[in-house]
Amino acid sequence: RVQVVESGGGSVQAGGSLRLSCTVSGLRFDDYAMAWFRQAPGKEREGVSSIIWSGDTTYYTDSAKDRFTISRDNAKNTLYLQMNNLQLEDTAMYYCAACVAWRTVLRPADFNYWGQGTQVTVSS
């Protein structure tokens, strides 16, 4: 069965950095585009960034542009999100998701497999 496991979340002060990881098993990782989503309390889940199967093409929403970097290592079945200059509004549960089709409109319903999430908390 497919397993998606995020890690790397934590508490950090504003301006700090975190690197999230997501390890996938049970499917052929390099057949899937991958994405990061986040959900803050009381808000809808929103897309953050996505990356194509090969890793050659990436997409960022405005909230992530210039601060976050998505990458993948297909040999390790692992997706990453490097987050720099974190702000209070970045506080959320971060989720990794897999999709058979490359997407730049990040709608949760379009993604096939999800992890349980990793919490990121940014304080002042």
Image (cartoon, rainbow, N blue to C red):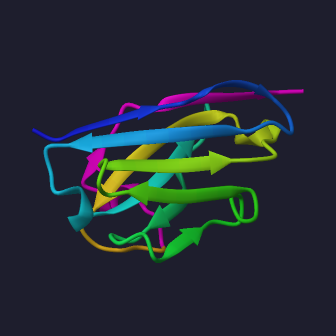
Residue 94 lies, in percent from the top left, at 53, 39
Residue found at the very far right of the displayed protein: 124
Q: Which residues are magenta?
A: 105-124
Residue found at the very far left of the displayed protein: 1
Residue at (66% x, 37% y) in the render: 18
Query: Where, by quadrant of the figure, is residue 13 drawn?
Result: top right
Is 96 included in the stretch rendered in magenta?
no
Q: Is residue 108 above or below residue 104?
A: above
Q: Is residue 73 above or below residue 92?
A: below
Residue 106 lies, in percent from the top left, at 46, 64
- Work out which quarter of the rendered image holds the C terminus and state it: top right
> Relative to 124, is 30 on the left or the right?
left
Residue found at the very far top of the displayed protein: 11
Query: Where, by quadrant of the figure, is residue 92 drawn?
Result: top right
Residue at (35% x, 74% y) in the render: 102
Residue 59 lies, in percent from the top left, at 55, 71
Residue at (42% x, 69% y) in the render: 55
Q: Is residue 96 above or below residue 58?
A: above
Q: Nearer the viewer, residue 122 or 27?
A: 27
Query: Where, by quadrant of the figure, is residue 39 drawn?
Result: top right
Q: Is residue 25 above or below residue 35?
A: above
Residue at (63% x, 66% y) in the render: 61
Q: Nearer the viewer, residue 69 or 107?
A: 69
One can see residue 15 in this view? yes
Q: Nearer the viewer, residue 11 or 110?
A: 11
- Work out which quarter of the rendered image holds the N terminus and state it: top left
Is 112 included in the stretch rendered in magenta?
yes
One can see residue 45 in this view? no
Residue found at the very far front of the displayed protein: 75
